[in-house]
Image (spheres, grey):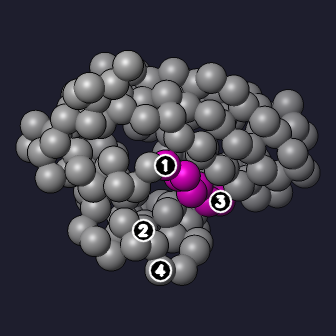
Amino acid sequence: MTTATDNATTVATVYRAFGSGDIDTLLGLIAEDVRWESDWEDNFAQRAGGPAFYRPFHGKDQLGGFFEAMGANTFHQLDVRDVIIDGNRAVARVALEYTMPGGGRYRDEQLHLWTFDDQGRIAAIRHFLDTAKLLAATRGEDTTAGRP
């Protein structure tokens, strides 16, 4: 069984590896049967045609689609503000800003819910975000325009 410290280290490694494009390190932290945006029913943003990286993925072998789609964005910000660990779950508060391939610009603060298996591998992730803003950016809108 992993400890909260182990899970905190995994979360920190995930964001560091993602920020540097180190997909091999990321994949080494993920369980074979991972549930990526797929452990909840009837996501309206997914139903409305959200970006490819926000679709459900089942199993580690499908995650190439997530990384390819997310990698097509140009990142301007990826800041982990807080991480809260409770047993086999972690919640990270993350500030993101990126430009999508279609020109839409997205900026938001999200919560990422990570679930770990008994070996400390990532078993599931769910992103909590402003889905209307994500859909607007997907359509090519600049969601950062007019912000204070």
Mark 3: few/some/many CA within 10 Å (<14, 14-19, 20+): many
Q: Tag 1's secondary structure? A: loop
> What residue did someone put label 3 on?
123
Which amino acid, mark 2? Pro
Identify the residue at image location x=31%, y=20%. Answer: 76
Is the Cβ of the residue at disc 1 closer than 8 Å to that at disc 3? Answer: no
The mark nearer the N terminus, 1 or 4, is 4
Total marks placed: 4
Mark 2 → mark 1, Cα distance in angstroms: 15 Å
Q: Is residue 128 inside the magenta stretch? A: yes
- Which of the two discs, 3 and 2, sits closer to the camera? 2
The mark nearer the N terminus, 2 or 1, is 2
Left or right, 43 with respect to 87, comes to left
Q: In which quarter of the image is residue 54?
A: bottom left
Identify the residue at image location x=24%, y=68%. Answer: 49
For the residue pair 57 and 77, the one nearer the viewer reads as: 77
Mark 1 → mark 3, Cα distance in angstroms: 20 Å
> What residue did someone put label 4 on?
42
Q: In this view, does 12 lie above or below 101?
A: above
Mark 4: few/some/many CA within 10 Å (<14, 14-19, 20+): few
